[in-house]
Image (cartoon, rainbow, N blue to C red):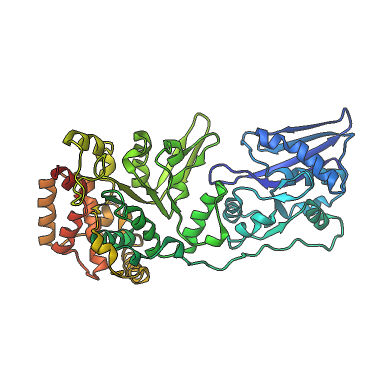
């Protein structure tokens, strides 16, 4: 046989469309031609495959004209994932392995020059695509051992792992009784959050701790404003310790995006991601881009936490790019020839100083900034961006007498239990968190009583809020009611919610 077909998959954003690797051997001047809109990494497979077959004790057709087509031809292909299917296609075209056995599998894997199989990006996305578009007959996905345990997290898809090309070939030989080992999920569900610290470690800062609890209870975004060294970064990291583990579906969503960038760690399965990019990050680094488009920090933080420290120091364009994802929970990256949608349902946690010197409102150290300097510094954050941040709280300086005393407050597990109960109420009532309620959901599930509504309307007019700010305070009030196990929104809930929107305004009034 001089023609062989091997199934594989490409990566197109979060999609993993099927690719047919067609290998044809013909007489003529010896050559190795690879076609099908292949990137440079794919074209280099010619040298890897040639060396891997020779060094694995397998025959390579040096005297044949080899043509490899990656179909469909209009789908861009990148990375070394097609090394394994190309090598198997050559062996099948030569008659060394059984072509009929290839129909039951899909292959992906990069080959070393010695024939070892190296991990590939997007293994989880490939398994999800196979489950979503199940072929007939149902195929088994064959991957390098380092990637197989990741893909095995997807239920309903058969996944096999191999460490060397010779292992795969041995299972495909005619009349062979050798079978590839089924991949197993090599870890238990890990709920250890000790790396994020405990909330009791934070001395004082009662208001900020309460704001963390409110933010965790419904996925609200949070901005902390205060002088240097008051514990803003410490508080942000401890937010992860009071959040519940991801559900299986949420964990698969998060892992699929991380897998695209090669950042998924099976040992952290069902743990929420905590990402903290440096303030020199560009807008492309935050929201994604490039060619081919890759997910940015907001997508890699999907279903997790994105911590932006020193918020005003980020480039203005990068911060403004966060507006739409904060509202919609996804990002669309459009280029001349490509368009990709990535999920971006992240929880934003940000920290900033109130002024350039950082000591505005600090009772211990006087601020040396002029009112103009304070205004220019805070103006680095646009009104539309601040409008989209639910909680804006002040984190004041803590005196040495507080720092020297014994730990106070509650441990993370105690707060986490209240957060869990509040989230359970929301899911039972409306099927989503309060931060995700749309207009119709607010009308149905977040209507305050008459006194609370009158109070909210009066505050909205006096403070000059937009419609978006009005609705965000309403969502906050609903979350506060859930934390208090209250069926309705009372004036006390609205009053507390209003206080969480005034940190920067109070700082300006203090100048």
* Percent coordinates x, y for residue 95 in the rendering: 87, 47
Relative to 88, 443 lies left or right: left
* Percent coordinates x, y for residue 150 in the rendering: 60, 57
Give the position of the N terminus as an image quadrant: top right
Relative to 218, 277 lies left or right: right
* Percent coordinates x, y for residue 476 in the rendering: 24, 57
Above-or-below relation of 211 to 69: below
Q: Quadrant of residue 53?
A: top right
Residue at image x 21%, y 34%?
373
Q: How many marks?
A: 0
Give the position of the C terminus as an image quadrant: top left
Which of 328 and 374 lies nearest the eye of the viewer? 374
Residue at image x 40%, y 60%?
240
Which of 120 and 158 lies nearest the eye of the viewer? 120
**Is residue 501 in view from this perspective?**
yes
* Percent coordinates x, y for residue 10 in the rendering: 63, 43
Relative to 107, 376 lies left or right: left
Residue at image x 32%, y 53%?
232
């Amino acid at each position: 046989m001089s023609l062989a077909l091997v199934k594989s998959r490409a990566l197109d954003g979060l999609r993993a469309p099927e690719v047919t690797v067609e290998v044809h051997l013909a007489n003529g001047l010896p050559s190795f031609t690879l076609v099908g809109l292949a990137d440079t990494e794919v074209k280099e497979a010619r040298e890897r495959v040639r060396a891997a077959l020779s060094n694995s004790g397998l025959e390579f057709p040096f005297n044949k004209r080899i043509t490899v087509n990656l179909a469909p031809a209009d789908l861009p292909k990148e990375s070394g994932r097609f090394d394994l299917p190309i090598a198997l296609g050559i062996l099948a075209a030569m008659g060394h392995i059984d072509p009929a056995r290839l129909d039951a599998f899909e292959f992906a894997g990069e080959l070393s020059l010695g024939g070892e199989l190296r991990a590939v990006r997007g293994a989880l996305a490939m398994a999800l695509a196979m489950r979503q578009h199940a072929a007939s007959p149902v195929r088994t996905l064959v991957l390098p051992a380092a990637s197989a345990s990741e893909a095995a997290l997807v239920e309903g898809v058969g996944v096999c792992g191999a460490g060397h090309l010779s292992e795969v070939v041995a299972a495909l030989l005619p009349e062979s009784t050798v079978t590839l080992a089924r991949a197993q999920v090599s870890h238990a569900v890990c709920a250890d959050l000790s790396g994020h610290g405990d909330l009791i470690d934070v001395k004082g800062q009662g208001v900020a701790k309460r704001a963390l609890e409110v933010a965790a209870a419904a996925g609200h975004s949070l901005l902390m404003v205060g002088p240097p060294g008051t514990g803003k970064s410490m508080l942000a990291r401890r937010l992860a310790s009071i959040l519940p583990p991801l559900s299986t579906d949420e964990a698969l969503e998060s892992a699929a995006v991380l897998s695209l960038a090669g950042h998924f760690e099976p040992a952290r399965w069902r743990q929420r991601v905590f990402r903290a990019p440096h303030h020199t990050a560009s807008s492309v680094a935050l929201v994604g881009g490039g060619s081919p488009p890759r997910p940015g920090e907001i997508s890699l933080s999907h279903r997790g936490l994105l911590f932006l420290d020193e918020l005003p120091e980020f480039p203005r364009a990068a911060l403004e790019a966060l507006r739409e994802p904060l509202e919609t929970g996804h990002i669309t990256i459009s280029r001349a020839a490509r368009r990709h949608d990535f999920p971006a349902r992240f929880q934003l946690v940000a920290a900033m100083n109130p002024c350039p010197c950082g000591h505005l409102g600090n009772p211990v150290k006087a601020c040396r900034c002029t009112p103009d300097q304070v205004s220019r510094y805070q103006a680095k954050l646009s009104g539309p961006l601040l409008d989209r941040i639910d909680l804006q709280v002040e984190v004041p300086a803590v005196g040495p007498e507080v720092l020297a005393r014994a730990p106070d407050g509650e441990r993370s597990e105690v707060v986490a239990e209240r957060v869990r109960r509040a989230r359970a109420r929301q899911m039972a009532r409306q099927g989503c968190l309060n931060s995700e309620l749309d207009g119709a959901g607010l009308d149905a599930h977040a209507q305050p009583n008459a006194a609370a509504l009158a109070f909210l309307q009066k505050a909205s007019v006096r403070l000059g809020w937009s419609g978006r700010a009005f609705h965000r305070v309403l969502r906050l009030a609903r979350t506060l009611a859930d934390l208090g196990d209250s069926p309705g929104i009372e004036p006390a809930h609205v009053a507390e919610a209003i206080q969480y929107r005034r940190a920067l305004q109070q700082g300006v009034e203090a100048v």
